[in-house]
Amino acid sequence: MNFSVIRSADTLWGSAAAMELAMQKRHLILLGKELPALESLRHKIQKHAGIQVQHFQTDDAVTQDIIAVCDHINMHYEVDLLFNFAEIGFEQKLEDFDIHQLDRKLKVSHAAGTLYLHQLLPNLLLHGNALVMQFWCCAAPMQPWQEALVNYNRHYSEFLNSEWKETGLTIKNFTVEVPGNEPVLMF
């Protein structure tokens, strides 16, 4: 039985992705920092979709949390889809961040997705058509340095796609700019 891992399932976009995948009758593993939100989403999906749903509390800024949850997933589940969600907008200027705030923000928004991919990669490669969906959400208009970070991640994904083209594993990137309340999807 194949599962889809949803990173940041305790956020608006992560929970929306989980609901969409549940409607496709995909079994889910929900990851996030807020346990009550994960439990609520799990119960809601199980009540309406009739699929298996697991949830695990993780802090994406803590590498040991990522390693531990991925080790558990790799031991107990088959995974053919990873939904990597990250909010990349910074609410203040770079120079105004405290170094610890900046460190956490960069780990959660950029490094954690690569760490999840690295740790789940052996599991994903067991499947002929595995998919990684990288979903970047930011406020519009995107600042030039934010766009540079998104472009870096896109280019990195293109490189990985070329490296893994014979494996069947594909990485797709999506950027959503949110002007006010209206998201605009950019591929």
Image (tube, grey):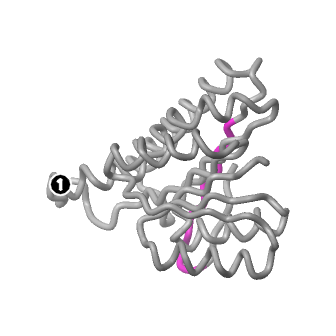
Q: Nearer the viewer, residue 180 or 67?
A: 67
- What is the count of numbered marks? 1
Q: Tell me if mark 1 has few (under 14), some (14-19) or many (20+) residues whose alpha carbon lies within 10 angstroms of its own.
A: few
Residue shown at 67%/26% (left/top)?
A: 161
User: In the shown orientation, is residue 132 left or right of residue 63?
Assistant: right
User: In the shown orientation, is residue 154 left or right of residue 78?
Assistant: left
Residue 69 pos. (x, y %):
47, 49
- Asked if the stretch drawn in magenta spans residue 17, the answer is no
Vertical order, 10 against 87 (above or below): below
Residue 24 pos. (x, y %):
84, 63
Vertical order, 91 against 100 (above or below): below
User: In the shown orientation, is residue 49 left or right of residue 36?
Assistant: right
Looking at the magenta stretch, what is its main secondary structure? strand
Q: Secondary structure at mark 1?
A: helix
Q: Amino acid at mark 1?
A: His
Residue shown at 58%/62% (left/top)?
A: 30
Residue shown at 34%/44% (left/top)?
A: 63
Q: Residue furthest front?
A: 76
Residue shown at 66%/42% (left/top)?
A: 132
Residue 128 pos. (x, y %):
81, 30
Residue at numbered disc 1:
100
Residue 5 pos. (x, y %):
63, 52
Q: Residue furthest right?
A: 24
Dividing the picture into quarters, in which one does residue 85 lie?
bottom right
Q: Nearer the viewer, residue 88 or 12?
A: 12
Dividing the picture into quarters, in which one does residue 20 lie?
bottom right
Over which residues does the magenta segment extend?
171-181
- Asked if the stretch drawn in magenta spans residue 177, the answer is yes
Vertical order, 83 against 128 (above or below): below
